[in-house]
Amino acid sequence: MPYHWLPPSGETRRLHLSAHRSLPPYGFVWFIGGTAALIFVPLLPVIATPVFWGLLPFVLAALGAIWWALKRSWSDRAVTEDLMLSRDLITLTRHGPRGKVQNWQANPFWASVHLHPRGGPVPDYLTLKGDGREVELGAFLTEEERRALSREIAAALAEMR
């Protein structure tokens, strides 16, 4: 599950959400190594010929492009959200790609959870509303996870009131 409630600290509850990464670091190494091996296999008959040296820059450029694309995809998925809920304050901190940090806070008594089945950028769009602002929560979650999370947060808010 890409989100989990951390053990409570006094009266404060904390929820940590993170985007799922299907390619772990060792998978990245294996994929790049396997791709390099598969690209170089057809070049074996032309090693030590002018054709090899003519093709080598293109092969290395292709490997470099794959490396760059995977690294970029990896950094774009490095999104975490932390929701801290206490009787006095609810705070959402989003750590986006490449170090971008966004904060939102409100009084939990007036905060509410909204699940928009249609009309949002994704089905079952999940938002928190309070203090005159509405913020998105868990954009990287699946529809089922957003529905379950909305129920859990609504229950946690009701418990804090």
Image (cartoon, helix red, strand yellow):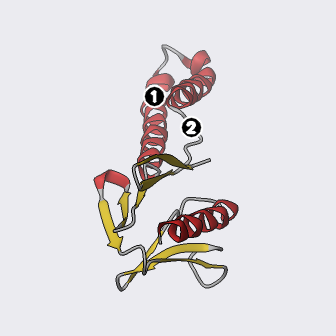
The image shows residue 160 at horizontal and vertical percentages of 47, 67
Q: Is residue 105 above or below residue 83?
A: below
Tell me the residue that label 2 is attached to.
23
The image shows residue 140 at horizontal and vertical percentages of 55, 59
Could you tell me if residue 126 is visible in this image?
yes
Q: Amino acid at mark 1?
A: Leu
The image shows residue 118 at horizontal and vertical percentages of 65, 83
Which mark is drawn over residue 56? 1
Could you tell me if residue 122 is visible in this image?
no
Q: Tell which of 82 and 98 is nearer to you.
A: 82
Residue 44 occupies quadrant: top right
Q: Report how many numbered discs are placed on residues in the image.
A: 2
The image shows residue 71 at horizontal and vertical percentages of 43, 42
Q: Amino acid at mark 2?
A: Leu
Q: Is residue 52 above or below residue 68?
A: above
Going by the image, does 57 lie left or right of 39? left
